Amino acid sequence: MTFHPETRPRHLVLVLGDQLDADSAAFADFDPVQDAVWMAEASDESTRVWSTKPRIAIFLTAMRHFRVALRDRGWTVHYRLLGEGEEESLTARLAADVRRLRPRALVMVQAGEWHLARAFDETAASTGVPLHVKEDAHFLCTHDDFRRHAAGRKQLRMEFFYREMRQEHRVLMDGDEPAGGAWNFDAENRKSFGKDGPDTLRPPPRRFAPDAVTREVIALVNKKFTKHPGTLDAFDWPVTQADAELALQDFLKHRLAEFGRWQDAMWTNEPWLFHSRLSAAMNLKLLDPRRVIAAAEKAFRCGRAPLAAVEGFIRQILGWREYVRGIYWLHMPGYLERNALGARHALPDFYWTGETDMACLRDAIGQTMRYGYAHHIQRLMVTGLFALLWNAHPRRVHEWYLAVYVDAVEWVELPNTLGMSQYADGGVMASKPYIASGKYIQRMSNYCAGCRYDPAQRTGPKACPFTTFYWDFLLRHEAMLAKNPRTVMQARNAARLTPAQRREITDHADRLRAAIPTAT
Ligand SMILES: Cc1cc2nc3c(=O)[nH]c(=O)nc-3n(C[C@H](O)[C@H](O)[C@H](O)COP(=O)(O)OP(=O)(O)OC[C@H]3O[C@@H](n4cnc5c(N)ncnc54)[C@H](O)[C@@H]3O)c2cc1C
Ligand code: SF4
């Protein structure tokens, strides 16, 4: 016997755009005879922040593929297409469908974003139908686990959390000791390419050419979201579970072994280097992090990748990814409002186009608009660093990061942006602000060689804006930096400046700010 769509469902299982896992807790007791699935596309999810076309497209096409996969199992899926009927918000669509379908209960996995979790609670309450929210088993650390980790600690640090996770989940452990006798192999990682650049013979990452479903979505996004930034000409992301697995295999075979060494390096027109490109697949829940971690550890145990690379990679997923989620849920909703440095400017307009004469920003933003992707150091030490030095309001910076990347979901984006990159949480995420002059970018990339500015100069016509704003930042935050042992040396450098030098830096920074257009 199969479920008849007109029958009143026992459970209506609600699936959000980043919950595309048929083995999730929401389906634990799914009975195709009595239950049905509900999914909806809603334009407010693309306009709440001014999302790029790649970001809008990846969610829509991955959702549509998931719908096909569920229907292939013979399950009933009530799916609301974008533009179908009146333009309604996600929750308005849900309320209308709940009234129409009259399920006995709603079931869902915890939403990944605080505002959505609240909105779904409220919508369910307004319909009078009980909502059963299940723990998201995709993650290795539950909210309660993280709260227990945080309890009684004055200051949280990822490194200690990560060690606990390694021990608890028996990852890269030899008995009670970490594999290789150390928790961290950073000394062997994080090199720059030098003058020669990356090996040009390595195979490019595997592409996933758009199929009919994706092509339809691309046409829809180009039509409906014409004015949104970014392009879809190069869209090639994995958008099904099977393709996500192929992307993982491709990374393990061709890039994992070199991942650690080049983790922080950047190179013009080289968007991927040795990164995995797996964040979107994991965040959409097409790929289980346990599977990724186990496969990477196996590559080390079988001698296919060195420990330094594998440990560095696993730390990102078992450590950072779980840690930032814990921070997000521990501190929301107040976290969104934090602005510890009192920053206040709008972002420069070029953040939406990449049209700037600063070569590093042009490259990082250009690829962001083309692929919806930039790797971690480009996000932290190019776009993020510039926004921090520019004195951009953290809310505006957050809105940008949430809008532009294919992997952007608030639980992971917000702590990275507001905490790690902008220091707006005053030290919850990072023990110091990540500040540097243009010389850091020069050391880690070839950007400066093709730029009209000089990273060694802080004032004058060739002065690198990163370097000018870096010194300006030191002057504006001298007292705060002097109190932190990790930045005291930088504060001392500022203290050595003469009054005339200080004036020169501030004047140059003010002129530069006035010359770069910003949205009001
Ligand atoms: C300002 C800023 C904003 C960011 N916004 C996002 C975001 O919206 N979504 C997102 O998934 N990541 C975000 N990150 C973290 C990181 O930059 C991306 O996860 C990474 O660049 C994705 O590319 P990749 O899959 O090739 O990663 P790799 O370099 O191959 O790393 C492997 C995996 O580790 C995880 N990871 C690595 N670093 C982090 C981190 N700092 N926090 C959480 N997970 C991490 C990701 O799942 C990633 O797929 C942000 C970082 C910064 C500095
Ligand atoms: S000189 Fe400055 S602006 Fe130009 S690429 Fe280097 S860091 Fe970027």
Image: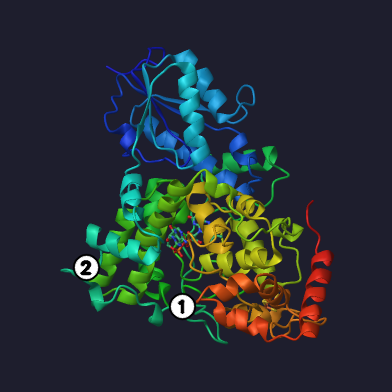
Above or below, 441 against 229 in this view is below
Above or below, 406 against 177 in this view is above
Q: Check disc 1 and report its element: helix, strand or loop.
A: loop
Which residue in the protein does label 2 denote?
173
Residue 237 visible in the shown view = no
Q: Amino acid at mark 1?
A: Arg
Residue 339, position as x, y percentages in the image: 61, 55
Q: Quadrant of ligand 2?
A: bottom right
Residue 454: image tag: none
Q: How is the image coloured?
A: rainbow
**Mark 1 crowd level (few <14, some 14–19, many ≥20, 10 Å Cα):** some
Where, by quadrant of the figure, is residue 469 drawn? bottom right
**Mark 2 crowd level (few <14, some 14–19, many ≥20, 10 Å Cα):** some
Q: Amino acid at mark 2?
A: Met
Residue 190: image tag: 1
Where, by quadrant of the figure, is residue 481 drawn? bottom right
What residue is at 61 percent from the left and 49 percent from the top? Answer: 403
